[in-house]
Amino acid sequence: MKITITDDAIKWFQDEMNVKEGDTVRFFARYGGNSTIHKGYSLGVTIEQPVNIGESITINNVVYFINETDLWYFKDYNLNVIIDDQKELHFSYEPK
């Protein structure tokens, strides 16, 4: 699996979550909501230290990651993090 994050989304993390150099941002599967790939689950995001990184990308000295325990959520998909038309963070999933 692969993580991609647009420049607009990087700016969103800086402006809305106060992400700065040296931070680590986790994407995680959470119970509740609905994603396009898993009914009853959605993707959460938080600033926290990694436990066992399963996949990551480093941009501007910030590590955006998924722990190994959450890789099941992305089976057969890549994660694209973008900003939608309403200027909100949006996750899209692209088949591998």
Image (tube, rainbow, N blue to C red):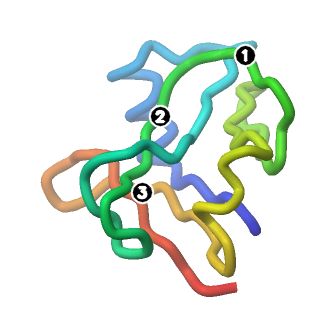
Q: Are there few (<14), some (14-19), or many (20+) residues within 10 Å of tag 2? A: some
Name the residue: 83% across, 47% down: 54
Q: CA distance from mark 1 to mark 2?
A: 12 Å
As drawn, 36 above or below 33: below
Q: Which residue is mark 2?
A: 45
Q: CA distance from mark 2 to mark 3?
A: 13 Å
> In the rendered structure, are the residues bearing label 1 and label 3 in contact, judged by CB atoms less than 8 Å apart?
no
Is residue 4 shown left or right of residue 67? left
Residue 69 point in image, percent of width and height: 73, 44
Q: Which residue is mark 3?
A: 82
- Three-letter residue code for mark 3: Ile
- Three-letter residue code for mark 1: Gln
Is residue 21 shown left or right of residue 15? right
Residue 49 is labelled as 1
Name the residue: 43% across, 68% down: 92
**Residue at the farthest left position:** 86
Mark 1 or mark 3: which comes first in sequence?
1
As drawn, 45 above or below 16: below
Task: Identify the secondary structure beneath mark 3.
Answer: strand
**Residue at the farthest bottom position:** 95
User: So how many labels did they put on this image?
Assistant: 3
Q: CA distance from mark 1 to mark 3?
A: 23 Å
Foreground disc of the pair 2, 3 = 2
Mark 2 or mark 3: which comes first in sequence?
2
- Three-letter residue code for mark 2: Val
